[in-house]
Amino acid sequence: MNNANPTYSDIVALLNTLVPTTDPNIESAPHLAFWRTMSRDEFVNKDTSDWGVSGPLVALNNPNGSNFFLALSGKAPFDGSELPQMPDTNADPNARTATQDELNLVETWISNGAPA
C-alpha cells in the first residue's frame, strides 16, 4: 500500500484485510461485501441511505463528511449511538477494526480526492 498517495485498489486491499475474503459472516451485513463488486466511481458515488445512515459513502476531499471514514473510525453515528463501528466485530468475529495507520490511509485517500 502506498500511504502517501493511496489509490482505490489500496482501499479495496485494506477492506479485504479488515474483512477477509474467506469470511462467511459478511453475508449477513446489510451492505454485504460491497467493495468487492463496485468500481471506484460506484464506490465514491454511493449514497448510504439504504444502509441505515443517509449521506455519501465518500465526500471527496472531506473525510469527516464521508460515511466510509466515519464508519471505519468509529465516529458518530458509527460510535454505537446509532450504528456500530465498522466492521462490526460483534456481528462478525472474523473481522477487525482499522488501525490508526489504516485510518490515516483512508483519510489521505479521501482528502486527495479518492484517486482511482
Image (cartoon, grey):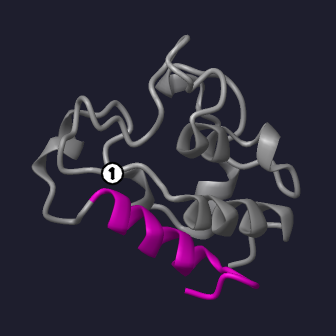
* Closer to us: 91 or 7: 91
Q: Residues within 10 Å of mark 1 (few under 14, many from 20)?
A: some
Above-or-below relation of 22 to 63? below
Which quadrant of the view contains residue 64?
Answer: top right
On the rendered structure, is 26 left or right of 103? left
Q: Which residue is farthest bottom?
A: 2
- Res 41 seen here: yes
Query: Does 85 appear in magenta?
Result: no
Q: Which residue is mark 1?
A: 96
Inspect the image, locate mark 1, and give the three-letter code of the amino acid beneath it: Arg
Image quadrant occupied by the N terminus: bottom right
Residue at 54%, 45% in the rendered image:
72
* Residue drawn at the location 80% of the way across and 38% of the way down: 65
Q: Nearer the viewer, residue 17 or 54?
A: 17
Q: Is residue 37 visible?
A: no
**Quadrant assignment for the C terminus:** bottom right
**Residue 114 occupies which quadrant of the picture?**
bottom right
Of 36 and 78, which appears nearest the observer?
78
- Toward the viewer: 44 or 85? 85
Residue 28, horizontal then vertical, whole percent: 20, 33
Residue occupying the point 48% across, 27% down? 51
Residue 55, relative to residue 102: is it above or below? above
Secondary element type, mark 1: loop
Residues rendered magenta in the picture: 1-19
x and y percentages locating residue 37 in the rendered image: 39, 62
Number of marks: 1
Q: From the viewer's perspective, is residue 61 above or below residue 21?
A: above
Relative to 111, 70 lies left or right: left
Coordinates of residue 14 in the picture (x, y in percent): 46, 69
The residue sitting at 18% across, 42% down in the picture is 93
Instruction: Measuring from the top left, give residue 74's x and y in whole percent.
Output: 57, 35
